Amino acid sequence: MPLKVLLCQKRIYQKKIKEDYDAEIAFLEGPITRLFSIPNKHTKKIAWIHNDISLVFGKGIKAKIKEKLDKKIYKKYENLIFVSKDNWEKFKQVYPNLSNKQMVIYNYINKEKVIEKAEEKQNEKFCENTINFVTVARLVEQKGIERLIKVHKKLLNQNLPHHFYVVGDGPLKSKLEEQIKKEKVQDSFLLLGKKENPYPYIKNADYFVLLSHFEGYGMVLEEAKILGKPIIITNTAAREAVEKYENTTILENNQNAIHEGLKEIIEKGKENQTQKKEDYDNTKIIEEVKNLLG
């Protein structure tokens, strides 16, 4: 599909977008951003950027080609919106001379809905006798689940029992299942699959973790903050989401640092880590979006 969009984007656009709209928003970098870049003099074009653009397409010749193609694509947008300051800075390093209007708008979150849904029943029970770590993530290379399984196995070998629960699905599921089986950690590292309601798992965890290779702002971190959970992240753009949240551990973004950080936490044992829940206010975000569309 991405190649089809690249080669036939004008035809696809004309087939799918049959009316003139006040605004067209490409809310994810990649094929949809390329598709919505087709000029339309009646419509404001807005692209939302959620990730570190210097890393999201990987390395090598394909990444270089996409980088050059996307420079032409982004020039066609009137507004570029970034979900974090870090992502904006990385974007400007890759594309330093674009003339469109650029700004940061953080993601909107329905705080009341998060709190309400967190009280619903959790299907899979957590282990009561060990520390339970939970992450909510797509099963893709970016999220670093493969190295997390390696860290988990090493910690178990050091007689440091704990459990990992991963809520989410994705293209690496089969590969990760094979790795879990090979390491013989099926009982302590569990892929729970996609959940319509992940909030009870976040609420009932001892720690929420997001140990990715790279990140955008990390909307799920705001949800973990709303639920008052202790948070562990790697040093990515996600740190922007937790810079004023006291109960946060930021680990260097490599396997050894993750191992040492989790080892220290497990050795301390279960503690009463829950702090005052985040008082999340969407007012400024709503006003910024209104001004953008107005």
Image: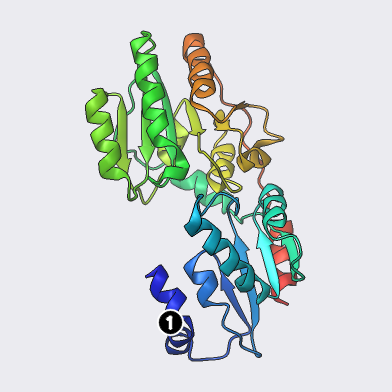
> Viewer-proximal residue, 138 or 284?
138
How far across and down, in percent of the image, does residue 233 sit?
56, 32
Q: Is residue 29 visible?
A: no
How far across and down, in percent of the image, does residue 241 sit?
65, 42
Quadrant in which the N terminus is drawn: bottom left
Give the residue displayed 39% in from the left and 43% down from the top: 120
- Horizontal placement of 116 versus 162: left or right? right
Quadrant in which the C terminus is drawn: bottom right
How far across and down, in percent of the image, does residue 158 sit?
38, 9
Give the residue displayed 51% in from the left and 57% down from the top: 63
Say which residue label 1 marks.
8
> Viewer-proximal residue, 264 or 134?
264
Which color scheme did the rendering employ for the protein?
A: rainbow
How far across and down, in percent of the image, does residue 113 sit?
51, 51
- Horizontal placement of 251 versus 285: left or right? left
Above or below, 18 against 227 in this view is below
Give the residue displayed 45% in from the left and 36% down from the top: 202
